[in-house]
Image (spheres, helix red, strand yellow):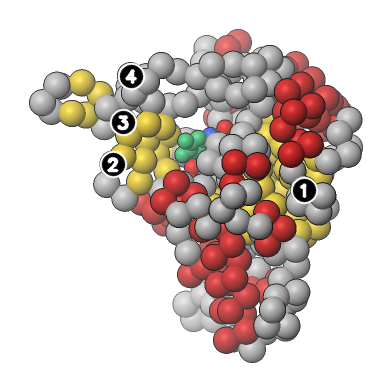
Amino acid sequence: MSARGVDTSTNLGGIALRNPVLAASGTFGYGSEFAPFIDLREIGGFVAKSLTLEPRFGNPPPRIAEVASGMLNAISLENVGVRAFVEEKLPLIPEGVTVIASAFGTEMGEYAEVARRLSESPRVAGLEINASCPHVKSGGIEFGQSPEVLAELVRSVREATKLPLLVKLSPNVTSIADMARVCEAEGADGVSLINAVQAMDVDIETRRPLLKNVLGGFSGPAIRPIALRMVWQVSQAVSIPICGIGGILDAEDAVKFLLCGASAVQVGTANYLNPKATVEVAAGIAAYAERCGLARVSELIGALELPGS
Ligand SMILES: Cc1cc2nc3c(=O)[nH]c(=O)nc-3n(C[C@H](O)[C@H](O)[C@H](O)COP(=O)(O)O)c2cc1C
């Protein structure tokens, strides 16, 4: 419930959220880093940085670069590992804050094992699997780029956990709707989209790519129309809930995702510009619902008026 009396609650595949705004994986640390700036209880929750079985260092720098209307990153696998997350990071999060953990790996079995370990913690409300990771055995293509590989991945993680399971989809595919159908068929409780768009940029003085890794993920406001298009297409293809992600800076951006069919949203790159972005987006959505005379924010989900309707 917002201060204005609007019911802001939503449900994301079995994860009850006090409002539809989550912080996106990789842009919010392990949550406690943002406690000096915001009351974590004022947002729907957060998705922690993706975790592997063992701690990993990421790519060497430069691994982030600012570009027009967004940023490139090639941070890659850097994380503290599942054990340190459960033992050292989760206890820092106040009770009542919804934590969604993100799992990834370079092998099918690693995802399932990370999911199993995370499922043992009562503080984890749900799992998101990051399918945008290169799959070693498939020659380095992302898990989320092949329907067959994605199906096997979702099946193996589904068997490993009873927690609500969200699959985070890669936008670097021909048909994201087909990928979402695969997730639904394999028992996912929801899909999150989009991850960063594969991209690169160049410094013409040095004639070098901006990132040492050459390729990186493009995020920020420039990708928002792509993300909206994909959320809309997926909403027409599946009946499991969608978490909309991509270039959300303010409440207006977030409302667009809800109208296109998202049950909740994630705020990513905006956290770097404004560490209060998530709480401001949450308050702004409630204010918009109030201005529209709605009793519940959830009435906005999929409420897009199509031309001719
Ligand atoms: C620096 C950085 C690190 C990221 N790390 C992860 C990650 O570990 N796992 C993941 O699923 N997504 C990761 N992402 C992708 C974001 O969660 C999000 O899907 C993407 O940035 C698009 O949203 P945005 O435009 O609001 O940033 C990362 C993004 C950035 C910018």
Q: Quadrant of the N terminus?
A: bottom right
Say what secondary structure mark 4 lies in: loop
Q: Residue at x 56, y 30 (%)?
A: 132
Look at the numbered discs 3 and 1 and tell me whether their residues touch, using CB distance below 8 Å: no
Q: Is residue 95 left or right of residue 43?
A: right
Q: Earlier in the sequence, mark 4 or mark 1?
A: 1
The circle drawn on residue 212 is 4
Inter-mark Cα distance, 2 to 1: 36 Å
Q: Which residue is depicted at the point 38% across and 26% down?
A: 63
Task: Tell me the kind of residue under disc 1.
Answer: Pro
For badge 2, the amino acid type reads Val
Q: Is mark 3 within 8 Å of ligand 1?
A: no
Disc 2 secondary structure class? strand
| Disc on the earlier residue, 3 or 1 | 1
SS at mark 1 in the image: loop
Observer-nearest of 261 and 220: 220
N-terminal label among 2 and 1: 2
Which tag is nearer the camera, tag 3 or tag 2? 2
Q: Report the Cα–Cα distance between label 2 and label 4.
A: 15 Å
Ligand 1 within 8 angstroms of badge 2 C-beta: no
Numbered label attached to residue 94: 1
Q: Counting other residues with Cα less than 10 Å from the Cα at mark 4, is it few (<14), some (14-19), or many (20 or more)? A: some
**Residue under label 3:** 200
